[in-house]
Amino acid sequence: KFIEFITFENATKRQKEIKKFQDSLENGKTVITQGGIYGRVREVKDNYVLVEIADGVKIRVNKNMVFDSPEDASQQPTK
């Protein structure tokens, strides 16, 4: 039972961190979608964000499906 409690507690903590990140999304932030697509946030709305995945190519993604990119934005090539 103790292990189950610790696992549940850790999962809840992670969910809160993800929610905090999603609520603080802003233009220029490098993100990854749940589907594995990397890009930069170009516009933030209440329920979705526009993510630029290539020069001039933007996709609309539900805010709940966007996560912090594990890669540092400075390591990604810019054009």
Image: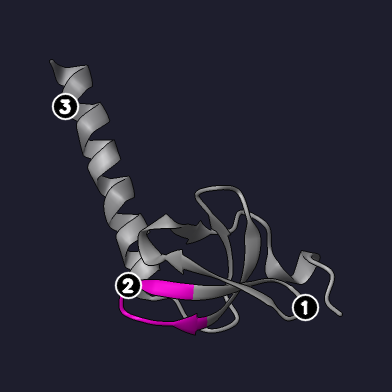
Q: Is residue 77 above or below residue 4?
A: below
**Residue annotated with mark 1:** 55
**Residue annotated with mark 3:** 5
Please name the residue shown 39% across and 66% down the image. Answer: 63
Q: Nearer the viewer, residue 7 or 27?
A: 27
Q: Nearer the viewer, residue 3 or 61?
A: 61
Label 2 close to label 3 by CB (< 8 Å): no
Residue 25 percent location from the top left of the image: 44, 75
Residue 23 percent location from the top left of the image: 33, 72
Between label 2 and label 3, give the one nearer the viewer: 2
Label 2 CA crowd tier, 10 Å (few <14, some 14–19, many 20+) = few
Tell me which segment is drawn in magenta.
43-49
For marks 1 and 2, the one nearer the N-term is 2
Please name the residue shown 52% across and 60% down the image. Answer: 68
**Mark 2, secondary structure of its residue:** loop
For marks 3 and 1, the one nearer the N-term is 3
Question: In the orientation shown, which residue stands out farthest toward the left?
Answer: 1
Please name the residue shown 28% across and 38% down the image. Answer: 10
